[in-house]
Amino acid sequence: MEQNVERVARFLQEAGTYYLATTEGDQPRVRPFGTAHLFEGKLYIQTGKVKPVSHQILANPKVELCAFMNGEWIRVAGELAEDDRREARQSMLDAYPSLRKMYDEDDGNTQVFYFKSGEATISSFTHQPEVLRF
């Protein structure tokens, strides 16, 4: 399982940008994200509490994300949980120092979520899909 989450994180980090899908009522919402970080063996993402995506995740923590790189794409479906510990926020910001222009671990806005569980599928037109559960 741990190797699976590491492989998923590496794919997302190397891709650089992935697209996170949430729901707002019955309307899907998709936007680009760039944070994918392993902390304590779990896959984390980051946002700001003031953003609509934060409210959408809190209302329905089931999300899906997708990234494309070098002829392969990954889809990750799972359920997020907020980690309100300072250590988790600080680890994310240390991993992505460019975020410090907008966020600080003690600003009351920085928010990190981790996948409680997830299933990733790596696909391409040249090989069978590979499913990774974490």
Image: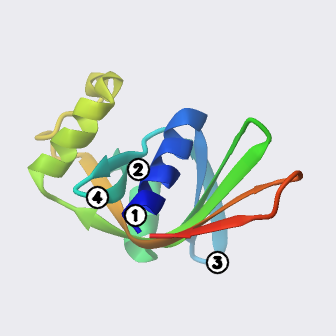
Residue sitting at 27 percent across and 65 percent down? 82
Q: For the residue labelled by badge 1, is the local secondary structure a helix, a strand or a loop?
A: helix
Percent of width and height locating residue 7: 50, 51
Q: For the residue labelled by badge 4, is the local secondary structure a helix, a strand or a loop?
A: loop
Q: Are marks 2 and 1 in contact (CB under 8 Å)?
A: yes
Residue type at mark 4? Gly
Percent of width and height locating residue 32: 58, 42
Alpha-carbon span between mark 2 and mark 1: 7 Å
Picture quarter with the N terminus: bottom left
23 vs 91, nearest the viewer: 91
Residue type at mark 1? His
- Which residue has dot 3 on it? 26
- Which residue has dot 1 on it? 55
Q: Earlier in the sequence, mark 1 or mark 4?
A: 4
Horizontal relation, residue 80 to residue 24: left or right: left
- Which residue has dot 2 on it? 51
Q: Nearer the viewer, mark 3 or mark 4?
A: 4
Alpha-carbon span between mark 1 and mark 3: 14 Å
**Is 79 placed above or below 83 here?**
below
Q: Earlier in the sequence, mark 2 or mark 4?
A: 4
Alpha-carbon span between mark 1 and mark 4: 25 Å
Within 10 angstroms of label 3, few (less than 14), some, or many (20 or more) residues?
few
Q: Are marks 2 and 4 in contact (CB under 8 Å)?
A: no
- Which residue has dot 4 on it? 41
